[in-house]
Image (cartoon, helix red, strand yellow):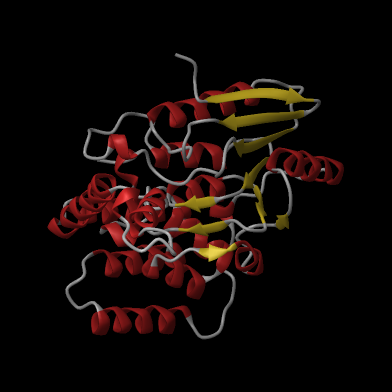
Amino acid sequence: MSSPVQWSREGAIAVVCINNPPVNALGHSVRAGLLAAFNAVERDPGIKLVLLYCAGRTFIAGADIREFGKPPQAPILPDVTLSLENFTKPSLAVLHGSVLGGGLEVALACHYRIIEVNAKVGLPEVKLGLLPGAGGTQRLPRLAGVAKALEMIVGGEPISAVEAKRHAIVDEVYEGEPLAAGLAYAAQLLAQGVQPRRSGHASIPAGVGSTAELLMAKRDEVQRSQPASFSPIRCIAAIEAAIALPLSEGLQRERTLFLECMASPQREALIQAFFAQRQAAKAVGPDAAVTPCKPPAPRQERLAAESKTVAELDQQG
């Protein structure tokens, strides 16, 4: 079986393509293929920059739900993202569609990012009782600031391409076809002679109010609105580690907190509910609609379920 990740050359640019329909989920073959492709590019002296994009209607939209609940297979996603960040040649992620969960974590590990104008990015793991476990809690605050990271990670809602640009999560917004836009932007980067720019090594940008005040306010908010919730408080603790610790130690802290969430009965219940909703949507089907003048609810639920393949259960055990 061929790998869902292939690469080719466009002059000094290596074009790495993920083609794992329908949503380019981060299954084992994609994770292994990404590492293999980047390692091959690393060894090629003629390659000066690597461009990562996805075929189909979306960039990586999250984990492969077929691997939910199964023992993780190496390489796990935290190892993949760390390897991508440490890549010695500049990398560019070209985003479109729904860039969620591990998909955004992969993009954050690349050195530069552009996004299609109608795309969205998000880290919705908290909705499944988890937290981003592949560096998202460490890299996002270093790009977008603590306030935005708290909003996105603790709240779990995606944001628009324009907002992602405004908060420095991406470098540019584009219109049109991803590969063409990516190659054009990659040519600009090469002309500028750019070097790797690692998100995990960036300093936390200054914002309104002290980080201690922001963390305290978010903890108070969670305790008022979700007093029995397990993962939101740990999301805050992981972001706090990004503020206080170097990347290596922050990633270890993130891992510990992720495993605490994995062991939580709350996480298990939310995952079961997620699968139950998917099964219900499939069982009802579009023919069950009784109001012909609007899209049937099951169809909407299926679309929502597709966008929620974000619990990184395949990456860590």
Q: Position of residue 133 (x, y in %)?
A: 36, 50
Residue 207's place in the image compared with 59, above or below, is below
Q: Nearer the viewer, residue 107 or 5?
A: 5
Q: Is residue 241 above or below residue 198?
A: below
Quadrant occupied by the C terminus? top left
- Looking at the image, which residue is at 50% across and 65% down? 141
The residue sitting at 38% across, 42% down in the picture is 63
Position in image of residue 100 (x %, y %): 46, 52
Say which of 116 and 33 sits in front: 116
Out of 295 and 293, give the one closest to the viewer. Answer: 293
Number of numbered discs on residues: 0
Q: Is residue 150 above or below residue 200?
A: below
Decide if residue 56 is on the left or right side of residue 183: left
The answer to whether 49 appears left or right of 235 in the picture is right
Q: Residue furthest top?
A: 1
Position of 55 with respect to 249 (left or right) is right
Q: Residue at x 71, y 43 (%)?
A: 177
Residue visible at 28% across and 33% down in the picture: 72
Return the x and y of residue 145 as percentages of the image width and height: 54, 70
Q: Residue furthest left?
A: 265
Residue 151: image x %, image y %? 44, 72
Quadrant position of the N terminus in the picture: top left
